[in-house]
Amino acid sequence: MTIPNSILKEHILRALKEIDKSGVPEKRRSKRYCLDYEGKHYPPKYVISKAAIYSISRELEPNEFSGGKSPGCANPFLESRGFQIIECNCGGKSGHQNCNILKEA
């Protein structure tokens, strides 16, 4: 399955608010990328999974779509909705000041 195009920026913003309240389960933390929004970091795939609730009335499972930066994956999808994705290994539990930004070698 691909990420539903019906997921809009407003759905993503609602998901971010929900994540702020409930947190990110350990098994859903990101390993390499974070969505950076208002000084907070979020795991891109988890954000899309939660945003789907507001679009298609169910949470997407992690195995239903791909993360990363290839076309059709989580990162370009979020960028196309106006969000910034950064390379970061905090797992979505940090903000700018506490994040270990991954440096290109």
Image (cartoon, rainbow, N blue to C red):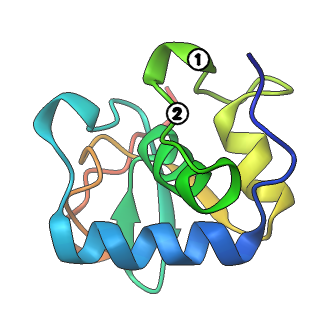
For residue 60, the mark is 2
Q: Is residue 48 above or below residue 62?
A: below
Q: Secondary structure at mark 1?
A: helix
Q: Which residue is mark 1?
A: 64
Q: Secondary structure at mark 2?
A: loop
Quick check: 89 left or right of 54?
Answer: left
| Farthest residue, direction bottom | 38
The percent coordinates of residue 73 (x first, y second) are 72, 28
The type of residue carrying mark 1 is Glu
The type of residue carrying mark 2 is Leu
The percent coordinates of residue 34 (x first, y second) are 45, 51
Q: Is residue 27 above or below residue 55?
A: above
Mark 2 to mark 1: distance in Å?
A: 7 Å
Quick check: 78 left or right of 102?
Answer: right
Contact between labelled residues 1 and 2, with CB atoms less than 8 Å apart: yes
The percent coordinates of residue 77 (x first, y second) are 78, 45
For residue 86, the mark is none
Residue visible at 25% across and 59% down in the picture: 99
Residue visible at 34% across and 36% down in the picture: 30
Residue visible at 64% across and 69% down in the picture: 11
Label 2 crowd (10 A; few <14 / some 14-19 / many >=20): many
How many dots with numbers? 2
Residue visible at 29% across and 53% down in the picture: 92
The percent coordinates of residue 6 (x first, y second) are 84, 53
User: Which image quadrant: the N terminus?
Assistant: top right
Q: Is residue 40 above or below residue 38?
A: above
Task: Please state which of residues 100 and 69 is positioned toward the viewer in this rendering.
Answer: 69
